[in-house]
Each structure stands twice: as structure tokens, then as C-alpha cells.
Amino acid sequence: MTSSSTHANGVAQQRPNRDVIISVRDLVVGFGDKTIMKGLNLDVYRGEVLGFVGGSGQGKSVLTRAILGLVPTRGGAIRVFGQDRDALAPLERRALEQRWGVLFQNGALFSGLTVKQNIQMPMREMRDLSQRLMDELAMLKLELVGLSSDAADKFPSELSGGMVKRAALARALALDPELVFLDEPTSGLDPISAAEFDELIGTLQQTLGLTVFMVTHDLDSLYSICDRVAALAEGRVIAAGPLETLLASDHPWLKAYFHGVRGGRLTAARVEQKDEQWKPAPTTP
Ligand SMILES: Nc1ncnc2c1ncn2[C@@H]1O[C@H](COP(=O)(O)OP(=O)(O)O)[C@@H](O)[C@H]1O
Ligand SMILES: [Mg+2]
């Protein structure tokens, strides 16, 4: 199957649906004598929202940082947009890095800078733009993430949790990326703010045609905006596919994860909807 898509140069092209944007093969990452990734494989396809789940401390952030080239790897290959970062010259690497935006797990914003200055950071580093243009762009980004222009001159400490995440998202979108990494974007938000943030990501993904790699513990996010879910356990991706497939899996880790404490957050309606998958699989003697 093919789908029509448009290149930056405006030429419509036929390309396979499953255009791989991030490819991770046999990845090994460790710190000291501790091995975190033990031959991890993962593909992320163009235009999808991939939800990445896994227990705390399993390496979700480490994988994110490894893909971004921020932690050294011990083996395997990582290609983003078909390019191997390590094989690139510094200028090419810089060009590659401008094609993605990141919302890190913690320290989403620089506390000593206003929201506007935070959003302009990547522009200042990567582009040569006039202050006036950067001001206009910052306002556009604020509008994109649903923040009013009043937020521009505020410091992060003056914002609610939901607004900080939105401002951080605005910064991640500063350079009009095609790919966005979100590391637990809704953690620490109340359920309503989290749902609103999910909706925002879903809307932006569709209007901007983004590919989204999202680490999350939030089952609501997995339900509402993720096209596929990949699960990390013991240094490998143990399953990747539609959430329904993972929910129906007999894998002990997946069962424990989805049916455990966090599974309790599922609303009755959703459990009913998914009732078929929640029935215990027939056991063979
Ligand atoms: N820079 C580092 N140096 C040493 N150990 C690290 C470093 N970064 C992460 N780790 C370890 O790697 C493991 C995975 O961490 P992390 O990816 O943050 O987990 P999570 O899945 O919760 O995001 C943890 O045991 C953490 O302590
Ligand atoms: Mg983490």
C-alpha cells in the first residue's frame, strides 16, 4: 500500500505507508558495569504517535537520549531519517538535529528565562533571525500550543504545570520539526490538564504532520493519541503494535503492567469496550 505525501519542495510523491523515521537495531547502552539496553530493536514510522512504555528505571529516557545522540552507545545502530548520526560531519549532524524537537522529562524550561526567551533559545542557537522575527515566531508558537500572549513575558515559576508543559512544547516546536520526542509529557499534571495536553499533541500531530515518539505511563494518552505502543522490559522492546494487541498479549510483563495498579485507572466504559481483550486467555493444560 502507498500513501500520497508532499515533500518540502512541494512535489507530491507516492511512498510506502511504513516509512521508517527512527530505526534502532541491536542497541546496547550501558553505564559502568550496568547494561541498560541489551540489543534493543525499534522502528518508528512517519506520521505516527508511538507510545513508549516500561517500568520506572528501565531505560525509557536513556533510549530517548541515545536516539538523540546524548548518551554513548556500546553497540548496534541508530538511524533517524535514514541517517546514522555517528557517520555524519558536524554540519550535517547539526542539520539533522534541527529536524527534531524535544520535550525532556525534567527541567522542561530554563527557570531564569521568560517563556518567550525559552522558545527563542533554539532559534538563537540554530538560526540567524532578527529579534523582531523571533518575537513574531514566539507568539505564533504560543498560539499553536494554546497559550495566550500574556504568557510570553512570564517566568516558568509563574505558570501552572499545564502551562509549563505547553511552553516547553512550544520550544520543542521552535524550529518547525518533523519529529518530536516527548518524555513523559503529562506526568505531574492533573487528569484534566493531562487530557487537554494529549488532545493538543493529537491535534498538532495531525495539523503539522508530526511523527511523535512519546514516553508515557499514562494509559489515557495511550488510548487517546497513540497509534502504536512499544513496551520496554529487561533492555529490549518486548512488544510493539496497536494497544489492543498489547492488551491482549499473554506476556507476563505486559499483563502485569496493563492489568496492574495503573490498569485500575481505566474507566469502566473503556474496559467494557475492550472487554473481549480483557477476558483471560484460555489456558491449555
Ligand atoms: N548518565 C547516567 N549514568 C549512569 N546511569 C544512568 C545514567 N542515566 C541513566 N542511568 C541509569 O539507567 C537506568 C535507566 O534510566 P532511565 O532511562 O532514566 O529510566 P526510565 O525508564 O525511568 O526513564 C537507571 O538505572 C538509571 O539510573
Ligand atoms: Mg525517564
Image: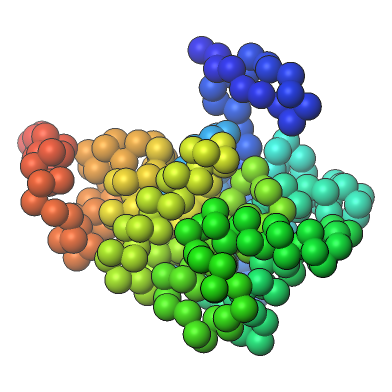
Front position in the image: 174 or 40? 174
Left or right of residue 65, residue 250 in this image: left
Side (left or right) of 235 relative to 233: right
Name the residue nearer the viewer: 169 or 214. 169
Q: At 40% from the left edge and 58% from the top edge, which residue is drawn?
A: 197
Above or below: residue 126 compared with residue 240: below
Q: How many marks?
A: 0
**Residue 230 image offset from top left, x and y in percent:** 42, 46
- Residue 250: percent from left, percent from top: 23, 42
User: Left or right: 122 with respect to 253?
Assistant: right
The type of colouring in the image is rainbow
Residue lying at 57% horizontally and 40% vertically, measured from the top left: 208
* Image position of 193 (left or right of 176): left
Q: Is residue 222 above or below residue 9?
A: below
Which residue does the image show at 67% across and 62% down from the upper left? 138
Q: Is residue 141 above or below residue 271?
A: below
Q: Is residue 285 visible?
A: yes
Task: Say which residue appears at 83% left-offset and 49% top-offset.
Answer: 95
Nearer to me, 277 or 152: 152
The answer to whether residue 238 is seen in the rendering is: no
- Which corner quadrant holds the C terminus? top left
Relative image position of residue 148 (x, y in whole percent):
51, 66
Residue sitting nearer the eye, 57 or 135: 135
